[in-house]
Image: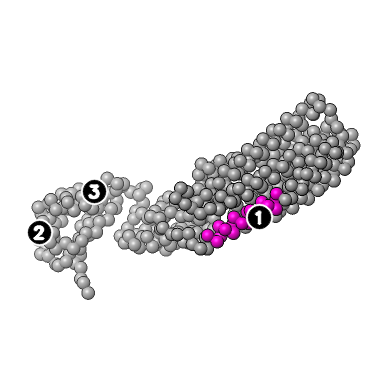
Amino acid sequence: MKPSLPLSNADSAENNVRQQTTQRVALVGMGVNIILVIAQILGGIFTHSQALIADAMHTLSDLVGDVIVLFAAHHAGKKADADHPYGHGRIETLATVVLGLLLSGVAVVILLQAWGRLMGEAPLVVPDASAMFFAGLAILGKEGLYQYTVRVAKKIRSPLLKASAWHHRSDAFSSVLVLVAIAGTQFGYAWLDAVAAIIIAIMILYMALQLLLESTRELVDTGLAPEESNKIIEYIHTLPGVEDLHLLRTRKMGGNVFADAHIQVASHISVSEGHKIAEYVTHQLESHFPEVTDVTVHIDPEDDEAGEISVDLPSRQEVIQALQAQPLAQGLQTSIHHLVMHYLDGKIELEVYLQTTPPPALLRDFKQACTQLPYLGSVKFYTEIAY
């Protein structure tokens, strides 16, 4: 059973803050990357450094990535609607896939160009020493962006911002490599510039594959890691009203986790009490695990994975019709106020609530009639007292 809870004002405000924060980080990244791209391209052209130009292409992919982040943040932050009842968090995942594909393309282009020069298809050129200044500038800018972005990503639990942060970090590493390679060319190792470009391409490609793997796992509803799921399972077992938990399914959507839990409660409690326990479990999970933002709790009166399946048992109306057709059950019909049925262990336990206390013979006859129906288990009688 899934408690139907509207989106609270607090949840809505949190979503708005998350969206605005993501957009702000993307805008800062765009501003810094625009400056770095211009500086690296001009520096690479005037200093004749292929590695510096390759690094500029890496930075340019960051810039395009920031545009994707802005787009995703705008659309992923929208509220759930009729067409998207689970929200728009998958847009973040899809944007991460696009970013991974973009990085893959950039890596292949850089790799082919640098390899061609290294193999003699184009002459090797020794960059001017001033290229080291542009490489150093790039290192400072990209590492600064990484520190800023990863701090915000952890705060708002955004895998997209985390991916963007590591993109900045990979750029910073590649710029360090460019700086070392340019310094090496000054000592007569002209091939270092092309080698640095190839290494950068391999780094970009590796990171792109990691992003694609993580994102596609999320798109096919991969659940939490076992150790994370076990923490949730252990916590649910501590909650009052929960007798057992025999199924927990999770899936990720953006920075959020959706969970489906099958919990076992006392077998003879009322529907409303079971619903109350479900609401309580939902609230406690969302409070204790902030990343869990949507919980569906299924209430079971028994372990339906271990016990007999009750799906083939007759409905209430069918049971009543069958009892009315039993001659021995006729005498008690006028005294019955209502019936309570418990579908447990492949049988129906019957509780008969009576308006008056009938003769014992009628009770024996009714029980005898129930034995003619093989799907009925225990039969108990209660007399209601109105006060």
Residue 365 placement (x, y as % from top left): 11, 57
Left or right of 143, for residue 368: left
Q: Which residue is mark 2?
A: 331
Left or right of 311, for residue 252: right
Q: Is residue 27 magenta?
A: yes
In magenta, the rendered stretch is: 12-30
Q: Which part of the image, by quadrant, shows the N terminus? A: bottom left
Q: Tell whether label 1 touches label 2 (CB within 8 Å).
A: no
Secondary-structure class at tag 1: helix
Q: Which residue is mark 3?
A: 314
Q: Tell whether label 3 touches label 2 (CB within 8 Å).
A: no
Which residue type carries mark 1?
Arg
The residue that appears at 81% across and 27% down in the rendered structure is 122
Residue 152 in view in this figure: yes
Which residue type carries mark 3?
Pro
**Quadrant of the image occupied by residue 24:** bottom right
Along the line of sight, the residue nearer the viewer: 245 or 130: 130
Mark number displayed over residue 361: none
- Disc 2 residue crowd, few under 14, some 14–19, many 20+, Cα 10 Å: some
Q: Earlier in the sequence, mark 2 or mark 3?
A: 3
- Disc 3 residue crowd, few under 14, some 14–19, many 20+, Cα 10 Å: some
Main structural element of the magenta stretch: helix, strand or loop? helix
Q: Is residue 65 magenta?
A: no
Give me the C-alpha separation between circle 2 and circle 3. 23 Å
Along the line of sight, the residue nearer the viewer: 281 or 140: 140
**Quadrant of the image occupied by residue 16:** bottom right
Mark whose residue sits in front, 3 or 1: 1
Secondary-structure class at tag 3: loop
Give me the C-alpha separation between circle 2 and circle 1. 77 Å
Mark whose residue sits in front, 2 or 1: 1
